[in-house]
Image (tube, grey):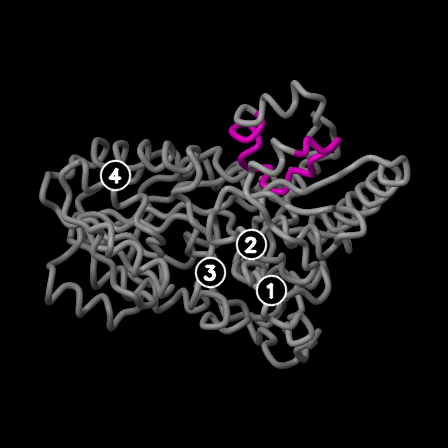
């Protein structure tokens, strides 16, 4: 293991307001990048581990990582693929239909997806008659999307790229970014690019995990190097107002343990602001996100979850029970590394993603197999590492449960299903 210096990628100031008053409240230790799965040929001793620490800005209250790992380390070859999840596909279908209906977007309009992955969301827009364009920095995913006929630029979104797109394809009536804005370090260039690419009455929709759900439901395993920012609503209002962009609506979304969808237009747009915007601001003020004690209490609960989970797993393991992990997810890798759970406790992991099968988890080096191995072996317990898809997975593995298998779920509290 190679520990990268904690000073090397240290955040100098808040990425929204520029304040250097950052309150550090949670340290999850040194970890490898969460999607850095290893093959048999890769020596684990060369694996780099980076500090994973969290702070909150005392001025605008943006929760963010204390260190920034360069994106090329994390995103050049990316193994998170939404099309392997029925929950994701159904969610994208709802999102696409809702945006087109709500904002009366005509067929043939340009829809651009930032961080488009393998094109799963863009497929929905294409089926609804939109012209589509994806943007994603991962070589493997951009290539896969283009093979499927989903036009994708292998690049990071920027103001310069936005200008190039307008020249070649025209302005966008719709721009979407689902679970990707938290990955972007330069949020100011993002906003400049949005203003360039958006049609006068175009709409940008971002969906991000909601920090209030993260705190209230103890979702600490969603904190990892790729996720630089953890958004509440008010810091976003501050950000967009700097760049002649206006937030016209916001709503909650249940995916990923609790998210919000935020809708943004240019300042000169004719679209009006929904009353929900002011309602959200009022509700957030009551959540005490401005108090250090809110974050300290969250950090305290995280330590308790670690203590209780490790104690429980060691106890049932000492009783001769077999335990495996279900879902080789990024959040699962955070949990495993933070809790120090490896092959001494889990025999292996199963996952539905072909790209991950045959590899080993970063840091903990647990082998990953197809789900068929679970169905064949019927271990006593399966630690559910993708709890955000718990309902889908538990329904899918009904036979496993009927044959005596049980799932261990850790978020928001430890329980057996």
Give residue 223's quadrant in the image.
Answer: bottom right
- Closer to the camera, 32 or 256? 32
Q: Residue 232: x, y in percent? A: 51, 48
Residue at disc 2, secondary structure: loop
Q: Position of residue 80 (x, y in %)?
A: 46, 52
Mark 2 lies on residue: 358
The reply, left or right, for residue 20 in relation to residue 335 is left
Q: In the picture provided, is 353 more to the left or to the right than 320? A: left
Q: Which residue is mark 3?
A: 183
Whether pointer 1 and pointer 2 mark residues with C-beta atoms closer than 8 Å, the reply is yes
Res 64 quadrant in image: bottom right
- Say left or right for 171 vs 306: left
- Spatial CA distance of label 1 from label 4 is 37 Å
Q: Give the residue at mark 1.
A: 40
Query: Distance from label 2 to label 3 (Cα)?
Result: 27 Å
Secondary element under disc 3, as helix, strand or loop, is: helix
Examine the rendered structure and indicate whether residue 397 appears above or below residue 227. Answer: above
Q: Residue at x 62, y 67 (%)?
A: 66
- On residue 124, the disc is 4
Q: Earlier in the sequence, mark 1 or mark 2?
A: 1
Q: Was residue 382 drawn as part of the magenta stretch in this picture? A: yes
Closer to the eye: label 4 or 3: 4
- Look at 57% across and 32% down and name the residue there: 390
- Give me the C-alpha separation between circle 1 and circle 2: 8 Å
Disc 1 versus disc 4: nearer the observer = 1
Magenta part of the chain: 377-394
Query: In the rendered structure, which disc, 2 or 4, sits on the residue that comes first in sequence?
Result: 4
Which label lies toward us, 2 or 3?
2
């Amino acid at each position: 293991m190679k520990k990268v210096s904690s000073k090397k990628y240290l955040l100098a100031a808040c990425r929204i307001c520029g304040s250097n008053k950052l309150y550090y409240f949670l340290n999850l230790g040194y970890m490898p990048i969460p999607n850095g799965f290893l093959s048999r040929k890769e020596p684990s001793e060369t694996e780099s581990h980076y500090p994973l620490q969290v702070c909150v800005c005392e001025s605008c209250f943006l929760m963010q990582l204390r260190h920034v790992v360069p994106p090329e380390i994390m995103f050049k070859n990316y193994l998170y693929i939404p099309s392997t999840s029925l929950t994701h596909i159904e969610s994208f279908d709802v999102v696409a239909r809702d945006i087109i209906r709500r904002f009366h977007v005509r067929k043939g309009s340009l829809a651009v997806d930032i961080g488009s992955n393998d094109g799963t969301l863009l497929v929905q827009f294409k089926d609804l008659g939109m012209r589509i364009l994806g943007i994603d920095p991962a070589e493997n995913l951009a290539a896969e999307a283009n093979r499927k006929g989903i036009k994708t630029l292998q690049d990071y979104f920027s103001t310069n790229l936005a200008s190039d797109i307008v020249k070649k394809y025209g302005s966008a009536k719709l721009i979407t970014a689902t679970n990707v804005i938290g990955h972007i370090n330069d949020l100011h260039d993002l906003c400049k690019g949005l203003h360039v690419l958006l049609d006068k009455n175009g709409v940008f929709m971002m969906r991000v995990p909601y920090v209030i759900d993260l705190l209230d439901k103890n979702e600490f395993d969603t904190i990892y190097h790729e996720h630089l920012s953890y958004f509440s609503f008010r810091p976003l209002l501050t950000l967009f107002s700097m760049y002649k962009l206006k937030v016209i609506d916001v709503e909650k979304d249940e995916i990923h343990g609790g998210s919000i969808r935020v809708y943004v237009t240019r300042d000169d747009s004719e679209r009006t602001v929904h009353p929900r915007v002011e309602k959200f601001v009022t509700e957030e003020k009551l959540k005490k996100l401005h108090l250090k004690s809110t974050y300290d209490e969250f950090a305290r609960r995280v330590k308790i979850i670690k203590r209780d989970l490790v104690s429980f797993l060691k106890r049932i393991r000492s009783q001769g029970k077999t335990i495996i992990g279900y879902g080789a997810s990024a959040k699962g890798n955070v949990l495993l590394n933070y809790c120090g759970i490896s092959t001494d406790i889990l025999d292996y992991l199963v996952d539905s993603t072909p790209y991950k099968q045959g590899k080993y988890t970063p840091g903990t080096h647990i082998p990953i197999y197809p789900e068929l191995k679970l169905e064949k072996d019927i271990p006593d317990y399966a630690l559910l590492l993708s709890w955000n898809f718990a309902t889908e997975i538990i329904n899918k593995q009904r036979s496993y449960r009927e044959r005596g298998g049980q799932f261990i779920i850790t978020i928001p509290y430890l329980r057996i299903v």
